Image: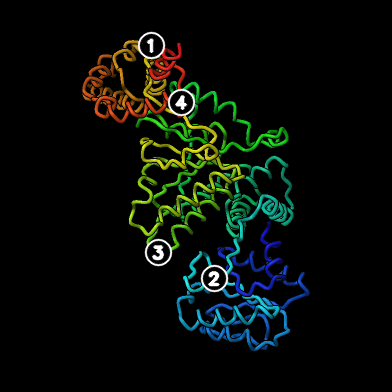
Amino acid sequence: MSFRNEFELFLRARYPLIYVPTYEEERVEAAIRQEAQNQGNRAVYTWDFVDGYQGNPNDAGFGRRNPLQALEFVEKLPASAAAVFILRDFHRFLEDVSVSRKLRNLGKLLKSQPKNLVLLSPRIAIPEDLSEVLTVLEFPLPSAAEIKVEIERLLGATGQSLGAKLIDELVRSCQGLSMERIRRVLARAIATHGELLPEDVDLVLEEKRQTIRQTQILDFYPTTEKISDIGGLDNLKDWLLRRGGSFTEKARAYGLPYPRGLLLVGIQGTGKSLIAKAIAHHWHLPLLRLDVGRLFAGLVGESESRTRQMVQVAEALAPCILWIDEIDKAFAGIGSKGDAGTTSRVFGTFITWLAEKTSPVFVVATANDIQSLPPEMLRKGRFDEIFFVGLPSQEERLEIFNVHLSRLRSHNLKSYDLNRLAYETPDFSGAEIEQTLIEAMHIGFSQNRDFTTDDILEAASQIIPLARTAQEQIQFLQDWASAGKARLASKHSSLSCRIQQQLQ
């Protein structure tokens, strides 16, 4: 249900106290005024702390710097007078005992009158004693249709016309921004060139990065990694390539739902994070990284509010990739943490969204310690698939060496013995192979020459791979995967070969 429809229902049902968390005062007030007009042309009164009530000359300035007086004004109107009162930034006064008591009294009084109080706030901050009388109504960020109307309005004002494809690209890049930010960045583009150009999409993306940074919850990641930069993992690559067109309208017409996401479980350094970046690049979707630790805040209720904000921003930016690195650390030991149940509530909100979301937000979560993950996370329906990313086989190590050396020394790649390197580095992960090459480059650079195969092997001899220092943990993961709890990301890993032998 849209905001307008829900607000109209609240007016007719005589919900006395409505709380709207939004940064978009101008846009939400326009929507409220339009709906008030539709409901028998109700009067609309707007108050803020600095200027008091505005609009009506007889009441101008009433309640200035006095939130209690602003509430008393509601009782001055005749009981039969239909009206909507918009109170800006009113969350700042809710802890005041007189304001809180007055709101509860008005909540009882206005049930029998055609009056509604709308409290506007940039965030949800409701004291416990008001939780039963205030009804929260979310105001979404602009939809694609609203953004398109605004872009076409700006184009009309400049006398410019753009192709449908560029307009759609601009609309998609603007999704996730407030209307005020959209107007600002497009006005900046027009002021720079006198018109909108295809390269202005980059300006919009920079504004989007700024917005996401200000949430202090999500990070906007630029992606340059490609699927071809990943050595091995053929099963996972095939799975991803088959779903490359799943976000298109053609897929919707075919009847396909949006892909939900992936849980990548495996050993550290095997390329799980690289996969998230490569998916975003290959599918041409923005990559958002969620640090789950940032969801948790000191104030009661703020962690849940941040979780809702994260969901709202991610869905507004959809289609996108939401990357959650090391999710096992964030939700380890739920129930045993002394945080008054905050972790459990955040986790509950998060997995409920995972299971019920219909927006094209593709979640890529990575985990190293499967034992730390709550069982609910592994239940079917949260993710499309759970993949196990194990240590690379000799064949895959050859591919990984080839990928890195092609990037580092493409001009003399043939001078390196890739087969020997792959054979001499058993139990090495992709990250350890990369570190080996960096160490070999230091050896060559310190002697004022290029590094060689022998330098790489010398560097490898000095590295003790994680597979040897964390044998028990890795053995547990391999046993868990071989029991059929997850699909294998690789066709040729040592684990897949072992499973094939067992089946035979």
Q: Which residue bears the numbered disc 1?
A: 414
- Above or below 121: residue 501: above
Q: Evaluate whether residue 235 shows in this view.
A: yes
- Say if 21 sits above or below 288 in the image: below
The amino acid beneath tag 2 is: Glu
Q: Nearer the viewer, residue 462 or 372?
A: 372
Helix, strand or loop at label 4? It is helix
Q: Quadrant of residue 184?
A: bottom right
Disc number at residue 315?
Answer: none
Which of 162/504 is in front?
504
Labels 4 & 3 near each other (Cβ < 8 A): no
Q: In the rendered image, which residue does mark 2 sit on?
A: 132
Residue at mark 4 to residue at mark 1: CA–CA distance: 40 Å
* Cβ–Cβ under 8 Å for marks 2 and 4: no
User: Which residue does the numbered mark 3 point to in the structure image?
Assistant: 299
Q: Are marks 2 and 3 in contact (CB under 8 Å)?
A: no
Q: Position of residue 32 (x, y in %)?
A: 68, 68
Mark 4 or mark 3: which comes first in sequence? 3
Q: Secondary structure at mark 2?
A: loop
Q: Earlier in the sequence, mark 1 or mark 3?
A: 3
- Residue at image coords 30%, 17%: 426
N-term mark: 1 or 2:
2
Q: CA distance from mark 1 to mark 2?
A: 72 Å
- Tell me if I can see residue 410 in this picture: no
